Amino acid sequence: MIVRPRRIRTKVLGYLFSSSTLTSTSTSIEITPKSPLYTAIPSSPTSSVSSLDSISAGSAASEMSDGDHESFDMTRRESFPDSIASSSTVASCSRLYPEKHYQEQEDDEEYENGFEFDTSESSGLLGFLPKWKKVEGTLPLSHNRRQRRKLRKSNWSLASIFGVLCCGVVVSGGLYCVVQHVKDKSIYVAVAEIGSTYPNQAESMIETPQWVSNVQEIPNDPTHVLIPPHDPPKVELLQPIHDRLPYEVLESYFSTGLIPSTFDSDSPHAKQAPLDLVYLFVNASSPFLQENKASAEQKEGIEVVGGKRHWRDNGELRGAVRSGIKHMNEHIGKVHVISADWELTQQDIAKLGYGDDDLLEKMNGWRIGQIPEWLDWESQKETDQQSKLRWHFHNDIFQLPVKSNGQIIAKPSPQLENDHDQPEVESTEAEGEEEHEDLASDPSSSTAHGTSEDGSEYYGKSDEEFEYPRVDPPVPVNVYWDTEEEWKQLATPSFNSFAIESRMSWLHGVSENFIAFNDDMFLLRDLSQSDFRHPLLGNVLRMDSGLLVAPEMNPMQLTDSGEWGALQHANELISRRFPARRRMYLHHLPKTQSKTILNEALTMFGEELSEAATRTFRESKRGKGDAEMAWLTTNLRIERWREALLWSWIVAKIGHKNGGWNNDARSDFINTLGITDEHISGNQKLLIQRRDDRKTLSDSFHADSQVGWQGPKATTYQFSSLDGHLNLLSDEPNKRCLFSLDQCLPADFFVDAEVSYTSEEIFKQIAFAEPACGDCLIHALINESGKNGIEAFLPTSEQIYLPPKKHAEQQREREWITSEPVLPLTDSWEGSDFSIETNVFEGQDTWSGALRRKDGGVELRRWVIKLLSRYTYVFGSTPSMFSPIHNYGQLDYALGTVARSPDLAMFCVNDDQYDASNGEVKRLFGTWMKDYFGGEIEGVNYERPNVEWEELVPEDEDISEQGGEKESPSVREYGIPTISLDPAEAAQGGENLQTWSRLRERVVRRTSMLNDEE
């Protein structure tokens, strides 16, 4: 048995307190219940316990008092068995309790007195113990009392543990209740935006479709490829916007004109989204194009004369794409090019040299597509390093809009009275032909033709006053379709750029916002995204306030080969849905487009635009005319912003707060406009003068600096939509307007205080019926908003609209369902419902930073801010030049102007040459493009190696030296007097250089206008 230190101590205490030793004569040690006893512990572990029996209490006390200085043996000792350590029988007799209880007693004592011993150590460590140990002066207890005490302590321990567990359960339950209470008190729930299941294509890698890898190149023909059958991906039109800034940023900016100080370059969504570039390509020299063009002319019953300038390939696309990549490299995403494709016929297969074994396979749904000779098709396939350029064909983008219920936009033919009736499309064409034949055969209807005294030709009566012939407008041809396949048979192949541009939102993988180019548009300087779109201010618009488009289409321009028929038809559509007015011309330069607005137009004017897309030529008689899509969507953005501003104040803010336009709403209206009793009694007009201290544009540069956005490099911002509505710009610094109470409001508005009106009534009256009233009201509310922001328009954060339960079911039954806030997607304002109940749905006020409410309510402030953020824009001006080219001399002069004008950022060369023009212009143009955009450019990884540019040949130089076509351009054929373009001659005639420059610009503009209208 091993003797442990604690047992030695117990034996000592038992000896001291035993009755045989503590006698009346031994009173040197005083024992009190609470006084500690200090006893000497032998330094040697070999000292037997029996030796302590012969030591009296007095000797023990004297030993303590003498302060025995016997040194300890600090050497580690070996453990000895109990028989050796305690050889005397007295040792066993000195125990007060049986051995089986001894260990328990010792453990209790040590626990009570706070002593801890490492039980892993043996008795051999006794030599390291201190000389004195503290012992409690209490008498040992009996065994039963010890057991009861131990039991009580065990019970207390169990009770303590149980109490701790109970307290833990109670605390945990309380915490859970608190958390649940807090969650219940919260009015928001963190959920994803409804409908945001579509990936952000601008930020994700666009996978190459399988059919692209299966395209077959044609030996010895680098300008065509064979396209396998495939189904183009479907596009859902009303998708949520992915690049919208967080709610707290937009709320602060729309309210105060400033962004939060915490929003910087490291914040989510702070990075400017790259913009894709989109180009159209066509090459009229293709024999497949010529065959399909002739077939399409025959199908439509028309003959296109003198149209080569629309399809001639001068190699522009290669230089145009290179210029875009060179001057916007790090700011762009992908470059998309759209070209024609056609069904592969048996004759085509024979021309391509395929054998009979391949005939059936190639005929089964394969198509032939057009590409430029410099394109390496291998770059379009899936590789480790994707090409910056993505190629598309017409067949993939010509699709019909699909409604939320899965139905396409169709135009079914009217019910025929009997089976013998012919379709209306054919009868209308026949009627048109008969009318023209009658006109030609009737002598009375023919017009006189002669030569006037000054030698000029005239048509009409031979009077001194010039008269134009009286010609009836062309008769429109109606077209109908029930399925997308029927519509596609009408619409393709297409040789009409207006129809192709209307389908751009179906481009696979195109970014939310992109820049649309024609293949004759070039960038000449480094630009940034902000030259085309600013993250806060929106898309950059470049418009001509001095050139306006009429709100109705001239029937004579149904078959117009220029752009004015398409512009007027587009304005006719806009003027039916919004106020009818003349609107500004859009410069013939690269245009910023948004898929959101393109798709919105396709839903609002779906039938008209789908019908216009069936016009395979500009000279077509189908439908009501072409529609210039870029112009339409630009003005749709402008009008939607104006509509949203007025709706926000009239319907969402004033109407919702007061439950309609009642007496309380009148008070708000009077206070906002500062209307007096004199104005009311006299029906006088209020003079509203726009404040001139707005800081929207100047403060936008502070936001650029804070977030790290690049500002525009070549564009000057002139007007922001955050400063109101862009109507016709004026040179007056403080534009004024008159708000007529009797014209803008119902007749009895101020007469009877008990009479109330619906918000929709007031809104339609001010926004559409009397558009000048809406424009003037916007000025007044901009003034009310202060120097920054549009706070006066916005509902308060406390205005919550709770849609009725049946609303969710109504939303599911709608034609168009979207998580985006949007006002009626209709083509006429008169039949539209602008009430909150019809337009505001649950969940439409949520996006990044704006959570959805648990009670299903819609915060009108958030809903309106999200709505307005769709349509922001900024009016800008960029140094640019548009040059219509008719001959070698004009191109040479234009290119010389570009060389002398380093500030030019954009350059458009419009091919207006005659059909019989030779290749000198093409070679001159190729030489210029090689000098400006040739060589190695980062990102140009899609070209075949060693493809040469078109360049001037010695014969061209000889013509140039001889004068040839390089003489001053003649404009006599357009009916404009010939003028000298030599500044020296102009100075001799009394004109200075400035006058000459202005005159030349006017001539160039007039020339381009006549060209468009010819």
Image (cartoon, rainbow, N blue to C red):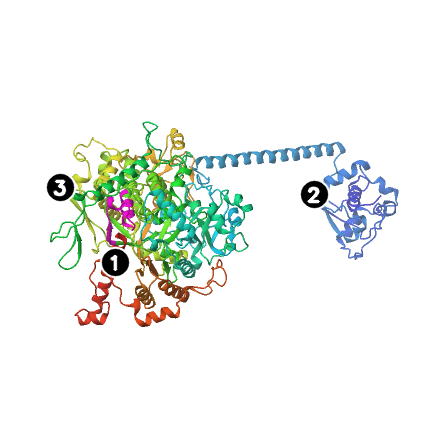
Amino acid type shown at disc 2: Asn
Q: Nearer the viewer, residue 817 or 975?
A: 975
Instruction: Identify the residue shown where x is 54% and y is 54%.
Output: 383
Where does label 3 land, which residue? 678
Q: Nearer the viewer, residue 566 or 574?
A: 566
Q: Are marks 3 and 2 in contact (CB under 8 Å)?
A: no
Rounded to the nearest angstrom, the CA distance separating label 1 from label 3 is: 54 Å
Q: Is residue 603 left or right of residue 737?
A: right
Amino acid type shown at disc 1: Thr
Q: Quadrant of residue 795?
A: top left
Furthest-top residue in view? 418
Assign a secondary structure to mark 3.
helix
Q: Nearer the viewer, residue 721 or 572?
A: 572
Tell me where residue 779 appears, x and y as whole percent.
Answer: 24, 47
| Residue 567 colored in magenta in the image | yes
Where does label 1 land, which residue? 1007
Is residue 952 positioned above or below 425 on the image? below
Q: Is residue 989 left or right of residue 217?
A: left
Res 113 label: 2
Instruction: State which tag comes first along the sequence, 3 or 2.
Output: 2
Mark 3 burial class by Cα count in 10 Å: few <14, some 14-19, many 20+: few
